[in-house]
Structure formats: C-alpha cells, structure tokens
Image: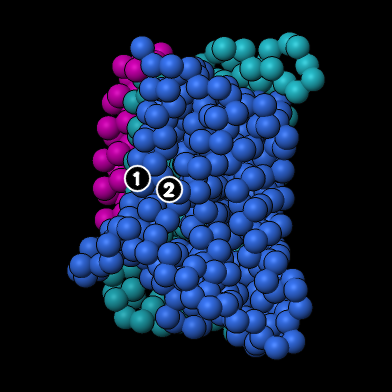
Amino acid sequence: MSAALPIPVIQLLQVLTVALGAPGVTGLIAKVEARLQGRRGPRVLQPYYDLAKLARKEALAPEHASWFFLAAPLLAVAAYLTIPLLIPVLTTYGLPLGYMGDILGGGFLLSLASFVVATAAAETGSPYAQLGSSRAKTFSAITEPVVLFVVFTVALLTGTDLPYALAATVRSGAGQVIRPAHLLASAALFMVILHETGRIPVETHTGTNEFGMIEEARSFEHSGPYFALLKWGSELKQLILFTILADVFLAPWGLASTQRLGAVLLAIVALLAKACAIGVVVAVIDDSFAKLRLFKITEYASAAFLLAVLGVFTLYLGGG
Amino acid sequence: MALLAIGGTTPLQPPVQAPGVYQGTANVIAALMLLLEFGMLRQALVRDQVRLYAAQSALISVLAIVIAADRNLPDLYALAALSAALKVVAVPLVLRRLLGAPASEDAPGVAGSYTLNPASAVLASIGLAAFGFFAFGAFHIHGPAAPALALAIAGAMVFVSFGLMIVRRDVASQAVGFFTLENAISLAALVVAAGLPLIFETAFLFDLLVAVVVFGMLIRAHHGRAESLSTADLTRLRG
C-alpha cells in the first residue's frame, strides 16, 4: 500500500516530469531517426550532455542588443514550464492550478514563448536570425486557424475548453473515440504538431541546411547558458505538444486517478512511454516523406485546415 | 467521476451526445470518403487519382458490410461484393488501360491542369462542401438507421466532385470526378434507403459501366485529336 502524495507535490511532479523528460524524448527521436537512415546515431542521453556543456560555456551578446536579448530565453522557458500546470500530465482529476487557464491559455503561453524568442532574434541585427524569426511568425499565422478550429471542436464536444474535460470525455466510452469530429480534430492537431516541432513539411530540425531552417535559425546569436535554455525550451515545447496529443486527444489512459505514490509513478512512466511512441511515429514520418518547397507550406496548412473544419462541420448535425 | 465546470456545481453534460459505435463508424467511413475526394482534388497524377478512387470505392463496400451487419440485411453483403468487384477492381483497371497510352507519355495537361493553385482549390472546395453539407442537413432526414451526418457528407461529396471537375482542366480528372459522383450517390442511397431491393441497387451500379465506356471513348477521341488530355486545347475550336 503506497502512501498518498499531497496535491502540491503532484503538481510539482507534473512540471518536473516534463522538464526532465523532454531532452530524453528528443534524444530518443534522434536515435530512431539515425537508425532509420542507417547511422548509429548519438546516445539517447546526448541532449542532456549538450545542455550541461552549454551551461558551462561563456555567454556573449551582440554589441547593440538590449537586455531583452538575454531575458528572452528565461521568459520562454518560464512560459513553457507553466503549461504543464494547465494540462493533464499525470492525473485524471484537475489539480488546483489546472484551472488557471484553458486550452486557449496554454496556446497563448506557447505563442508568448515563441514571440519573445523571435523578438530577441530580431534584436541581434543578424540577418539570418531575423529571417528565421520572420519566417516563424509568418507560418505560425498560417497554422493558427487550424489550432482555433481544433479548439472549437473541443468546445463543442465538451461544452468547455478545459483539456481535463476533453480527456474525461474521451475516456468515457468507445463512442466518443469513433466519432468523426474527434478523429478529424486529432489528425489536424497531429499535423500542426508535425509542423510546430519542425518535422514536416519544410524544416530540417537537425539544422545544417540553411534554407530549410525556420525556428532553428532564431537562436543563431545566442551562446552559452542562454543557448542551452533555448534548446531546452524547444525540447520542452515538443514534449508539451506530445503530451497534449496523447493525454488529451489520443490516449488519455494510464493517468493517475488517485493520489497514491504508485499510481503517480505509473503515470510518469506511461506519459514518457506515450511520448516516446509518438516520437517514433514522428521520426518514421519525418524519414519517409520528402521535404516540400518553402512556399508549398500553404498546401500542407490547407490540408490540416480541411480536417479541422470538417471536424467542426460534422458536429453541427448532431452526429459527429 | 463527475467533472465540475469552473464556478459551477452541476456535472458537465456534453452538448453533443456521442452517436454510438455503429453510427460513429458509419460517419467516420463517410468522412474518410470525403477526405479521399479532397485527396483526388489535390493529386497531381492521374495514376494516384485512380488509386484514391479505388480506395474510396473500397470504403463504400466496407460501409455496406457495416450496415448489413448492423441491420441484418443479407442483400447488402451481395451488393458490397459486387460493388467491390466492379469499382475497386474493374473500373480502375479499365481506366488505367484507357489512360495507359496517354499517361505513359508525358501526358501533357494533367499534372499542371489546375485553374486555381492547389491551396486555393482546397479552400474553395471547403466552401462547396459546406454548402452541400448544410443544404443536405436542412432536409432533416433523421431515423434510427439513417445517420443524418453521413447523408450530409454525401451531399458535400457531390459538390466537391463537381468542384473537382471544374478546377481541373484535363479529361482524365474530369472522368474520375464523374465516377466519384456516383460513389457519393451510392453513399446517400446506402444511408437513406439501405433496404432498397438489390435489383435497383445493382441497376444503379451498372449505370456506372455505361459512364465508364462513354468517358473512355471521350478520352480516347480527345487524345487522338488534340494529342493531349487537357481540355484547355478545346478553346481553339471556337468559331
């Protein structure tokens, strides 16, 4: 019989799981991807070593950059670490701070983080970092309608826009899973996540091909601990998006329904396993499709938009 | 466990009830068919369009089996088998044979036959689909066996297949668009009148064969005359 954990500890564990698990998930994806390409690939723990190494290095800033250049990585990581409080990471029941914000609140925090990083990149005066930030902003404006329609679908399905409510609805029966609205919204969200984590359609996240870089280009001028924070931030963002997909849309099973230590530990393992499973799927998709040309991104976004819009349509006649 | 809304004390009631597994399955299949229709709209190669058409036809056979199992209509198993033989195997085979000669050359006028760019074509077709969807939804055909949603999706498919014929300027895509129109009508017929005698359903199915032959001849004649599959070349014939 395991002991019951106090609620604040569980809430803290939600943040810690995401914070500490994120580099590992990234490492696993890199490993799987390398294997698929016939390489041995880096160690799964490599991202942790990278972060530790960068944290020990000297930090430099461009001559005319203001204080914001150095504040931005901190702000971004703070925003990313707030989101695990709002979404179901480990528990089926809402934790006290879980109702601070709804899905839109989480979306705002993601956008805020991306905005401060883009602004810091624009601060530097380096044309390449600026190119990255302007591209990132342009394309996020294109995928924004898709996210909004996914939120509408969630709202129509549950009557709220709380992630906890959708997860509970999905768990309530097979009829809630095999319905077009849910499947279409999940597929649209998955496409957005592929785009947001820089897999498909144009970006190469490993970042050696300059033409294919969008988000990776933004951190060019940062160095040392600040660069480590930016890297950690993008790993956090990836795990947060995977968590939303797994624990809210696709598989909200394996979460703790009590405060028992055993259940919470099981939930931590389940979350990381689900994230790794999604990561493997993402790596397979990433390796099996050719990258598109940059301006073809609208076609990709329009396909995701189609799925999301159909999801909302199907709900209107009561059968979706 | 009842989930409480913020500030409220009543358990949450989802405003849209889940439709149940059978209706859900039927609706999901219908939605997939509509997505394949959009896929055909975006596909650049005729070969891929034909493949998607075969997939769409396979889905309608699956739907027939689901309905037959759920409502105990053994006739529909026969219809599913017949429809699969005809639309998944025979029609795509004939189409590939017909297009074999033109498509193996560089097939001018097929790959770039969009009158709109693909993203705009999809957005315009979403508009068409919305119109068809809500127009059919306004009929209010409800029943225990007829998922209103699947019917509305069939309506949307009719409009999107018209859209496909309009935005593509090549005979091959237009033929595929026309054949999917028949799929849309079959979907509506299956959903609304699953109990229709087998002989009627089969008769509708064989109408398709006539259409295939007619379109085949048109494609052949057009290619023989214009050395292209594009209908853009026909404008020269204007007096």
Range of residues picked out in magenta: B69-97
Please tell me whether residue A193 belongs to the stretch shown in magenta.
no
First along the sequence among labels 2 and 1: 2
Compute the Cα span from label 2 to label 1: 14 Å
Please tell me whether residue B88 belongs to the stretch shown in magenta.
yes
Based on the displayed image, in which of its 4 quarters is residue A277 positioned? top left
Q: Which chain carries label 1?
A: A
Mark 1, secondary structure of its residue: helix
Mark 2, secondary structure of its residue: helix
Amino acid at the residue labelled 2? Gly
How has the structure been colored for display? by chain
User: Split into 4 quadrants, where in the image is the C terminus of chain A?
Assistant: top right
Q: Nearer the viewer, mark 2 or mark 1?
A: 2
Labelled disc at residue B225: none
Taking depth in this image into account, of A221 and A104 the one nearest to the observer is: A221
Q: Mark 1 points at which residue?
A: A277
Q: Do labels 2 and 1 share a chain?
A: yes
Q: Mark 2 points at which residue?
A: A21
Chain blue in the figure, letter:
A
Residue B149 appears in view: no
Taking depth in this image into account, of A308 and A52 the one nearest to the observer is: A52
Q: Is residue A238 left or right of residue B159?
A: left
- Percent from the top left, x then y, of residue A130? 66, 81
How dense is the environment of label 1, judged by Cα within 10 Å: few (below 14), some, or many (20 and up)?
A: some
Q: In this view, does A110 lie to the left or right of A265?
A: right
